[in-house]
Amino acid sequence: MLSLPQRDTICINHLVLTVPLLSGAVWPKALGKATLQPVLISLSIPHGISSTASSDDLSHSINYSLLCSSLRDSLNDKIAPLETLEALSARIFDILLLRSSTDAPLVSEAHLKITQTRAPLNCKAVGVESRATSLPGNSWAADYVKHFCENLECSTIIGINPCEREERQIVRVNVSIERSESGVQRHNWVDFRSLARTLHEKIGKSSYQTLEALASYIAEETLNYLWNANPDPFLRTPFVSVGAAKPSAIVFASSSEIQIRRTYSDYPASFTRQLQSEPTHADRVTRTVALALGSNLGDRFFNIELALRLLEAPPVVLGISEDTVHVVDTSFMYESTPMYVTDQPSFINCACVIETNLMPLELLKLLKAIEITVGRVPSVRNGPRAVDLDIIFYAGAVIDTRESLQTELDDLEGELVVPHPRLAEREFVLKPLNDMIPDFIHPVLHQSVSALLAAVETPAKTGSMYKVIPFPQCPLPTNYVFPHTSVDVVPPTLTHWIYPSVHQPAHASRTAPWAPRETRVMATLNATPDSFSDGATHNTLPKALEYAQSAVAAGAGILDVGGYSTRPGAAFITPEEEISRVEPTIAAIHAAHPQLSISIDTFRPDVARAAISAGANCINDVYAFTGRGSYPFEETGDAAGGALKCMSAMKKVAREFAVPVVLMHSRGDAGSNKDYNAYGYAGPGETVSEGVRIELGRKVDLIVKGRGGVRRWLVIVDPGVGFSKTLGGNLEVLRDAAAITADVSVGSSKTQRNPLAGYPQLIGASRKSFLGVILEQGTGRKTEPKERGWATAAAVACAVQQGALVVRVHDLHEMIDVVHIANALW
């Protein structure tokens, strides 16, 4: 039976039923004629038995006697004929898992094995083993199925010794076919009679010397049978297990045997070229595909963004309206030194996951057309290119369109080989893939993406790839011409930030090579009369321009402009009022300093759009695109409507202008909702950090993943120091900020990857009230926000030590000095 997790289980073993089967027994029946067949039913039902054990009362358990009676009453020789054993499986799951049935005690999960003992000729038994669970809406789904054929006896020539080559001998074969999906569906039914006959004939005609070769041949022939029977092998990739035994091989043993497990990818020469015979559009289904993108000529960031927008508009490129491609996830973006041909500019590399109904060769055609559209021209192999798009994984398929398997792996022009034969040595492809699909199993190498990356990511190479965040030019230059009217305008690039691609220890400067660790400074300009720290200081245009000039002179990396105070109790203002505050300020600063990056501190889509149109090129949102909704954030129900509507609108703005976004952890009003006891499982000193990982990570996943998502490489996360956290919570987050974005497991069961893993951080502790509390506790002196400069300096130094990409500050010149020294130290 199927292996079960360590839970209590109620089992029924080998319940004998007699059912009418259209598939017949040892000999086939005439078409449409059923024959009564004995079958053995074995059930395993996960069910806690503690209450029954302590009370010795069967009412707390599942009455297996009643269950057997119900099955026998419902499945007898009087029922309508059943097509196959799979149909019998479906009928049993209906009885067990559907609420509309009163034939048996209701269960939520069942593991079922059906064995037909009067099997087709030459077999001892055939059967189906499956697992199903009940679903909402009174339905069920099977997530695993195994078909098996036991003791198929074949007479063949097998053996190395001359005497074994003179006479046939019996080989006993066991074959099983496993699929991890809805296996009792019609498309996965197995005609045991046809399969047994096919294998019996082919094994009888074979003449192998070793059992190893025979077992491999049987596996390949079984897969070939399934391939031809299955119209869409990509979605239903089976694993075939074969046991081949020679009872006459060893005098003092019952048999010698070889056991193997194989799938299509183990026989690439047999199962790849058939891909060229593709189904029509009417037969198509959506598949998940991983693509790699690279560029090292021209405006590299522009090239990649344009390629992605064209990718999602295949009718424009191919002219076929039925084609669909949707980007559903993106990696971080990396700058890497070139491989193979090293005398060329550095590459920008990234990857994406798409959902598409395009077949492999059509998708290849689309990618090549996009390369030409973006501007790729013929070059030396592995040489410079405006953009390069490659299919890395196509569902779980192994594809090779070459007429002969060449020893040279680089000359693939005009051919499609998936996965790429050099993937395992290419860190610049594996690292982006690991951001999105670390657990995906390479269909040929049978290792996960994370394992392949670990094998190639040696300490000597750790500094060879940096992460990159591009900042676009907004608004568009007056003389800018964008020729592609079918997609949203892609802005040219203003600048980009580089930062380490892996978490860097504090002593990394002594253990090169590492990427230069440089924390940037975000200068704060509040165009408001009531901000907690500098209200009415810069809310006139001359004062704002003066501050911007000082920010540029001091070397600030970005200027953050806000028009709506988020301090507790701040007055409500309309979106129109907020726009009237920030739009002229941003426009004037951009006109005076066109090379300065500007972020708009807002949670409103209309304000963000107006600010970007005026010259901002980054969005800083303290509510992470969910607006000022109530806490906790919900994805479903009435309370979710406003938050998700706001998120959709903000994503649309960010996607349209390709601007970076800062997403902060908050729980509504900054001064409330400070209880993190729900995350107590994380242990002392980790509770608030775990809350940030889970709560902000949930929003970030919704923003990045799925159709219409923001590119992962454009997201900066902010743990929200000073927002909905106690004094201890703020210190915890600040003290161990690197842990918030570490690649660790989260959740009470520690089975989920940290959704914030790898994201760069902005930390804003400047002048916050918790600093004032610490000062008052230590000195007895109450401080105003402007008096917390030295306290802010300590917090900023800690943020730099924790690897923050950017710190948001008010005391500009002093904090830039602090950051310079801290950068030199760490």
Image (cartoon, rainbow, N blue to C red):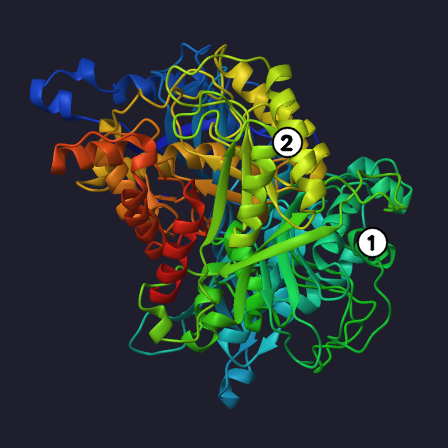
Q: Nearer the viewer, residue 402 or 784?
A: 784
Q: Amino acid at mark 1?
A: Ile
Q: Find residue 436 and report its horizontal and vertical position in percent.
A: 53, 50
Residues at marks 2 and 1, CA–CA distance in whole angstroms: 39 Å
From the viewer's perspective, is the residue at label 2 or at label 1 nearer?
2
Residue at left 75%, top 39%?
475
Q: Tag 2: Cα neighbours inside 10 Å, few (<14), some, or many (≥20)?
A: many
Residue at left 53%, top 28%?
625
Q: Identify residue for label 1.
A: 370
Q: Find residue 76 and report its horizontal and vertical position in percent.
A: 46, 20
Residue at left 55%, top 53%?
553
Q: Amino acid at mark 2?
A: Thr
Q: SS of the residue at dot 1?
A: helix
For marks 2 and 1, the one nearer the N-term is: 1
Q: Tag 1: Cα neighbours inside 10 Å, few (<14), some, or many (≥20)?
A: many
Q: Nearer the viewer, residue 626 or 794?
A: 794
Q: SS of the residue at dot 2?
A: helix
Disc number at residue 585?
A: 2
Above or below, 405 relative to 815: below
Q: Find residue 200 and report its horizontal and vertical position in percent.
A: 60, 60
